[in-house]
Image (cartoon, grey):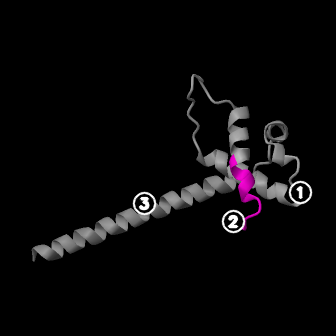
Amino acid sequence: MFSYYVIGAAILISIGIAGWLLRRYLLRKKAWRTYNDAPFPPAWIRILRLRVPLYSRLPSSLRERFHRHVKVFLSQKTFTPCGGFKSVNDTMAVAIAGHACIMLCGSDG
């Protein structure tokens, strides 16, 4: 008799965890869609041209994909200052995202 309660509790806990994971996935997907629908800021393009040398050599056919990768990267990552810096400004964050995402331009993802 006791084992039926344990099995029932395990099933309920599993359903709760699955619901929580599904809700989290759907909220994140909605946030990504909202973030990706926004136009790529011109200030970020200037930062990328100055701080990411390969950006200027990137074919225009890949720039849109690169911009999407940079926007998603910046929406998902949190930057923590170190080495004596008090904060991480937009220039630093966009440059880091640009260097990190330049490798993804040739992939299918």
The image quadrant that residue 32 belongs to is bottom right
Residue at image location 65% in from the left, 49% down from the top = 73
Please state the extent of the stretch shown in magenta in the rendering: 100-109
Q: CA distance from mark 3 to mark 1?
A: 41 Å
Q: Provide the residue designation for mark 1.
A: 59
Residue at image location 72% in from the left, 46% down from the top = 99
Residue 33, percent across and down? Answer: 68, 56
Residue 25, percent across and down? Answer: 53, 60
Seen from the viewer's position, the closer of residues 37 and 82 is 82
Which disc, if any, is residue 109? 2
Disc tally is 3
Q: Amino acid at mark 2?
A: Gly
Q: Provide the residue designation for mark 3.
A: 20
Which disc, if any, is residue 74? none
Residue at image location 60% in from the left, 48% down from the top = 76
Residue 14, percent across and down? Answer: 33, 68
Seen from the viewer's position, the closer of residues 107 and 33 is 107
Q: Nearer the viewer, mark 3 or mark 2?
A: 2
**Mark 3, secondary structure of its residue:** helix
The image quadrant that residue 77 belongs to is top right
Residue at image location 59% in from the left, 37% down from the top = 79
